[in-house]
Amino acid sequence: MMKVHCLVLACGNTLRGDDGLGPWLAHWAEERFRKQPGLRIVSRQQWTPELAEELAAAASVLFIDCSAASPPGVVRLEEVQPAAPAQGLATHHLGAAELLDLARELYNSLPRTALLLTVGAGSTDLGEEFSAAVKDALPEARKQLETAVENLLKAFD
């Protein structure tokens, strides 16, 4: 098995408007970084506890998701720290901080660097189209994603 220097974990539902941003960016990253050694890209409808094992084995992680808490179209790239779930472990869906906490609890291991790339959602209504705000934010989101992955991989050159 290839050593994963950078794990990209995207989540989102492609049938819920802007919530499909994570899978869309993951697909873009797969094309952009095709055959890049040390990089693994995983896209799921939601982050589940099973991903903790992959997370624990990765040197760095970049989570990608849309954000209902940010203004529509606002792109943010922030460090994320492990945090225990506020109301106990959910069995079907975890946030980035909770997934990191689970990796630490189960495997006593964490990536050296954990980043979260989000774009504020304008609409998560049924449909496969992005809102105007998210469409306008795509170039910046791709740029942030590309730079983050390059920097995370560069740490291993």
Image (cartoon, grey):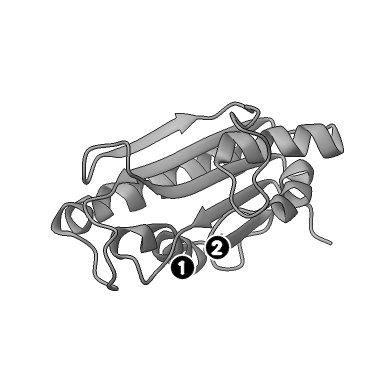
The amino acid type of the residue labelled 1 equals His
| Mark 1, residue position | 27
Return the x and y of residue 60 as percentages of the image width and height: 65, 39
Which quarter of the image is occupied by the N terminus? Answer: bottom right
Return the x and y of residue 81 as percentages of the image width and height: 59, 26
- Residue 4 is left or right of residue 133, and the answer is right
In the image, 58 versus 54, the foreground residue is 54
| Mark 2, residue position | 43
Q: Is residue 157 visible?
A: no
Q: Is residue 97 visible?
A: yes
In the image, 10 versus 3, the foreground residue is 10
Ranked by sequence position, the earlier of labels 1 and 2 is: 1
Look at the picture and state if 130 lies above or below 146.
below
**Mark-to-mark CA distance, 1 and 2:** 8 Å
- SS at mark 2? strand
Residue 118 is drawn in which quadrant? Answer: top left
Taking the spot 85% from the left edge, 32% from the top edge, the residue there is 108
Look at the picture and state if 34 lies above or below 84.
below
Q: Crowding near pointer 1: few (<14 within 10 Å), some, many (20+)?
A: some
Q: Crowding near pointer 2: few (<14 within 10 Å), some, many (20+)?
A: some
Return the x and y of residue 106 as percentages of the image width and height: 84, 38
